Image (cartoon, helix red, strand yellow):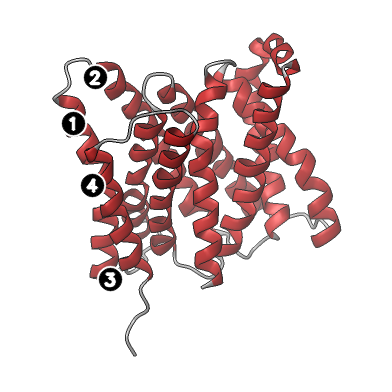
């Protein structure tokens, strides 16, 4: 149960950051946002890893895995998410992320060879139906072309995040939680630096306390707290089941979009969230006997 709570809180924080990311993407270059977020994160994580875990150096295999986690889970995920949020709403962006459980379940079955029960497959499928509902609604909207492109870009980010979840599961427990989080953020900052460097002049905008505060919040929650919680939960939960918890991502994204950004909540979103709620219950309901 503790692992479930850790995974749920991690995804809720990621979802809340969809709205924050949209605000940041309207004021700063995409690559710069992601790079600075990672820089702030590894500055915070280094003393934590050193004081709590002694900062042992992971094996070469684990470091290689963490590098690819950075490529897919930070670079590709953030590029797709932030670029897509410039074209679509935070509410719909969060709903697109509802496809994560289905993508992770398929990946865990094909790549990690995890056996998923029929109930887990149904749970992943129900979560993915939220995206289908939005896509159909958009296809019937003559003015929805931009949002369709935005949603497609966010789905590219979904694929990156799914690969990250599977990679993280492969090395779960082989490195300390804080140490693994530090190395991932260090690799992420390095990967993003060439893309962020040309836009470094825009850092001056962070003199605005509101914008600077948003970036700090974004970094500490999405790149520190979420990673630590996620790595802890993955140690005791199969990747296929953990993937279902990503369905909480669009739910928290919706709350942020409606409460903070003032976006409209439609009947399509109600149906989508109902399906995702059922999916989480199915995936986590205790087995008999």
**Mark 2 Cα within 10 Å, few/some/many (few <14, many 20+)?**
some
Residue 231 is situated, as x and y percent measured from the top left of the image, at: 59, 58
Mark closest to the chain's N terminus, 4 or 1? 1
Residue 119 is situated, as x and y percent measured from the top left of the image, at: 25, 69
- In contact (CB < 8 Å): disc 2 and disc 1: yes
The residue under the point 58% across, 40% down is 70
Identify which residue, 141 or 170, lies in the foreground.
141
* Distance Cα–Cα, label 3 vs label 2: 37 Å
Label 2 belongs to which residue? Answer: 144
- Front label number (4 vs 3): 4
The residue under the point 60% across, 42% down is 222
**Mark 4 Cα within 10 Å, few/some/many (few <14, many 20+)?**
some
Label 3 belongs to which residue? Answer: 117
Mark closest to the chain's N terminus, 3 or 1? 3
- Front label number (4 vs 1): 4
Label placed on residue 271:
4
- Front label number (3 vs 2): 2
């Amino acid at each position: 149960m503790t692992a479930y709570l850790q995974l749920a809180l991690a995804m809720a924080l990621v979802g809340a950051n969809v709205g924050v990311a949209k605000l940041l993407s309207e004021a700063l270059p995409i690559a710069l946002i992601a790079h600075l977020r990672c820089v702030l994160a590894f500055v915070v994580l280094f003393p934590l890893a050193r004081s709590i875990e002694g900062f042992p150096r992971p094996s070469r295999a684990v470091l290689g895995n963490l590098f690819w986690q950075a490529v897919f889970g930070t670079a590709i995920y953030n590029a797709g998410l932030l670029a897509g949020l410039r074209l679509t709403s935070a509410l719909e962006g969060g709903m697109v992320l509802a496809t994560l459980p289905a993508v992770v379940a398929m990946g865990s079955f094909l790549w990690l060879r995890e056996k998923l029960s029929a109930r887990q497959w149904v749970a992943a499928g129900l979560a993915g139906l939220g995206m289908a509902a939005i896509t159909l609604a958009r296809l019937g909207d003559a003015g929805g072309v931009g949002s369709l492109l935005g949603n497609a870009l966010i789905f590219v980010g979904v694929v990156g995040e799914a690969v990250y979840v599977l990679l993280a599961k492969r090395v779960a427990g082989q490195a300390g939680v804080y140490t693994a989080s530090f190395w991932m953020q260090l690799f992420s900052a390095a990967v993003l630096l060439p893309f962020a460097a040309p836009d470094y002049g825009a850092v001056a905008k962070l003199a605005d306390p509101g914008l600077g505060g948003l970036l700090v919040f974004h970094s500490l929650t999405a790149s520190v707290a979420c990673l630590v919680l996620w790595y802890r939960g993955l140690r005791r939960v199969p990747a296929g089941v953990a993937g279902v918890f990503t369905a909480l991502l669009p739910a928290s994204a919706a709350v942020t979009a409606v409460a903070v950004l003032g976006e409209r909540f439609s009947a399509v979103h109600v149906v989508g969230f109902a399906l995702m709620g059922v999916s989480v219950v199915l995936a986590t309901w205790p087995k008999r006997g």
